[in-house]
Amino acid sequence: MSQQRIPLWINVGLIPLVNLLMAFAVSVLLFYYIDINPLDAVKVMWEGAFGYAEGIGFTLYYATGFIFTGLAVAVAYHAGLFNIGGEGQAYVGGLGVGLVCLWLGNTLPFWLLLPLALLAGGLFGAAWAFIPAYLQAKRGSHIVITTIMFNFIASSLMAYLLVDVLKPATTMAPESAVFAEASWLPKLHAILAGMGIEVPASPVNASLIWALLCAVFVWGFLWYTRWGYQIRSVGSNVHAAGYAGISYSRVTIIAMVMSGMLAGFFALNVIQGELHQIKLNYVEGFGFTGIAVALMGRNHPVGVILASLLFGFLYQGGAELSFEYGVDRNIVVVLQGLVILFSGALEHMFKPKLETLYLRLAGKQEAE
């Protein structure tokens, strides 16, 4: 079946929507099992995530992190690589952002500190992705195995640094000192207040703008540059790309370094924008959930943004559901698992049928 004849709105819009509806249909059975009216549960989750300004802020805060990690997975996927190391790359990226804020927060003006923090987070994440990329490109190691192992190495490295190097002598908690306030990313409500728009305080911060800019950059890079064309060519058919003179090794390293850089930017949202210090396990699974975000978003920047909003809704709405009904917050993990199941493992359950139906209807219209 020719993918060129299938419009973007089917691949990025309709198919994920059908998968999502099926996931929620199965979730209905789950809610009945725990003795909760499904319609009431959806209402509570919706109102908790989008029903008031503070809830929207929390939803956007979670979505910002998912945009970074989802884009990271998507870029690697277009090169035929499955980057499982977003968790570790985001973790190490936090070290880069944190060191800049700790060492230079009281020294440099914010307009100069911010690009340095951006650069450090991106470079640290990219460096952590470069080693598995090099091993895959030059030594034949499997990218899935090496990135998984590097997640464990990153966790151990950060634990050591936080306990034995960065932890202030005045505390027993495995965390760094609090950054100077001058280095904090401004919250979105503060930015809007400066424009005369008053909204309640929430964790969403200026990194949301950077996440959206990164999505635009990824779109332009992958579809409108020579390197992006080479990445997509290798991902589509590595042998044909090789015959065309495209270097598999170079593409692997470029795609993974860019993927790690995007994952490293995750730290801007959490470390510089909310926690204002490096904490143990601050990534909290966002790197792994980014895989589901990319799958749900069909590895397209627009789809990643929409899928990030969905998972932000599940996180914030799940918190409200837990508070309202007293259910375990892990119920959200089950809902996420169902979304992943239908958007990933069972993707081809509906995709061929929908594409065949579209081509049949399109053929009839052309015949008429």
Image (cartoon, rainbow, N blue to C red):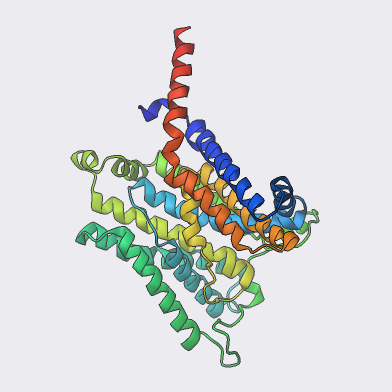
| Residue 106 sits in quarter | bottom right
Please indicate whether residue 151 sits to the left or right of residue 99 in the image.
left
Is 95 left or right of 250, judged from the image as shown? right
At horizontal 48% and vertical 17% (from top left) the residue drawn is 361
Q: Residue at x 60, y 92 (%)?
A: 170
Q: Nearer the viewer, residue 362 or 108?
A: 362
**Which residue sits at x=41%, y=50%?**
75
In the displayed orientation, state which residue is furthest to the bottom: 169
**Residue 208 visible, this angle:** no
| Above or below 338: residue 257 | below
**Image quadrant in which you'd find residue 109:** bottom right
Question: Which of 194/188 is in front?
Answer: 188
Image side of residue 332 versus residue 258, left or right: right
Foreground: 245 or 350? Answer: 350
x, y (%) of residue 368?
48, 6
Q: Quadrant of the N terminus?
A: top left
Q: Position of residue 248 (x, y in %)?
A: 24, 49
